[in-house]
Image (cartoon, rainbow, N blue to C red):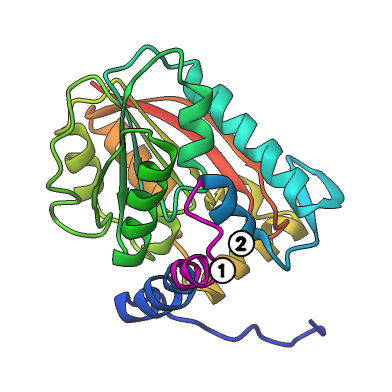
Amino acid sequence: MLAGESLPQRSKTEAEIVREYDVEKWGGLLLEAERTGRGFTFAAVDQLNMDGLDHCVSVRGDVMSWEEHAVATRRFRRMVGRELRALMPASALVEFGAGYGGMFFPVARALRKSRPKLIALEFTRSGRELLARISNAEEQPVTVGACDLGAPAITSVAIPDGAVLFTCFSAHYVPVLSQNIIHSLCALRPKAVVHFEPLVHPELQSTTMGLLRHRYLESNDYNRNLLEVLEEAERAGRIRIDSVEANWFGLNPLLPASRIVWSAT
C-alpha cells in the first residue's frame, strides 16, 4: 500500500457473510469433498481446505515468522488446546462459530481424556453440514447446532451448566457487539468463556503496527468493540476478566488473535 493510499472499505453484512462462508467457503468445501470422494474424515476435509495455502507470516506477540501455513496452523491448534485443557474438567466444550471444525476437532482430540460433552455451533448451513458429516465419519459424538453471536438469542441448543465456551475468529465477524452477548453467554452458566479473537487495544495504537491493525479491522468491517463490551460488563459486576493476552497468535500479522478468559460473577 502506498503512502496516503486508502484501503478498500468492506461491509460485514449478514448477506456478505452468507455469500463468503455459507456459499463460497464452507459450501465450496462441502461440494469439493463430495466431488473428490476422499471422504469426510477431519483429515480429508482439512487437507482440502488447506490446498493451495503455502506459507504465511505468523505472529506471536511482536515476533513474526515466515513459515509453512500448515505448521503455523498446527501450532495455533496446539496453543488453543492447551488453554482449554487447563480449564478442564467441564461438563461440555462448546464452540460458537465452529465453521467446518478446523479448530473444534483438533481441540476435542486434545481433550479426549477429560471427556466433556462436545457441542459445535455454527452460523452457516453448509458449515453445520460439514460438522455433522465429520462427526459421523470420525465416529465422535458431537451435538451440532446453529448460533448467531449478533442475535438476541445466540443459540437455542441446550448447553449444560458448567461448560467451557469459546470463540475463535468468529466474534470478529460481528462489527459491533452489544451487552447482549454477555447476557446470553452468562445465562448458560458457564465454567469459563474464552475468546481467541482480534481485539482493538487502545494502549497499543500508538505503535505503527497497532495503527495498521486497527485500520485493517476497520477496512474489513471486523469487530472493534469486543474488549470494550467485556470491560463494561466487568465494571458493572456481571463478569470477571481473568486474563488478557494481546496479539497472542495469528497467521496474518495484521489480524492476530488475542486471548481473553472470563467468567460470570
Residue 60 pos. (x, y %): 74, 40
Residue 150 pos. (x, y %): 25, 59
Q: Quadrant of residue 106?
A: top right
The relative height of residue 89 versus residue 251 in the rendered view (above or below) is above
Give whichever of 106, 176 is nearer the camera.
Answer: 106
Residue 84 pos. (x, y %): 48, 24
Give whichever of 244, 87 is nearer the camera.
Answer: 87
Mark 2 and mark 1 residues within 8 Å of each other at the beta carbon: yes
Secondary structure of the residue carrying numbered label 2: helix
The answer to if 201 sits in the magenta stretch is: no
Q: Is residue 106 left or right of residue 126?
A: right
The relative height of residue 150 versus residue 240 in the rendered view (above or below) is below
Q: Check the image and name the residue furthest to the right.
A: 66
Amino acid type, label 1: Thr
The answer to if 37 sits in the magenta stretch is: yes
Q: What's drawn in magenta, residue-wise?
A: 29-41
| Label 2 vs label 1, nearer the camera | 1
Residue at figure coordinates x 76%, y 50% from the top left: 58
Disc 1: which residue: 36
Secondary structure of the residue carrying numbered label 1: helix
Instruction: Name the mark on residue 189.
Output: none
Q: Quadrant of the N terminus?
A: bottom right
How far is the residue under mark 2 from the one under mark 1?
A: 9 Å
Disc 2: which residue: 48
Q: Earlier in the sequence, mark 2 or mark 1?
A: 1
Residue at figure coordinates x 67%, y 86% from the top left: 6
Amino acid type, label 2: Leu
The relative height of residue 9 versus residue 96 in the rendered view (above or below) is below
Give whichever of 92, 234 is nearer the camera.
Answer: 92
Q: Check the image and name the residue furthest to the front.
A: 37
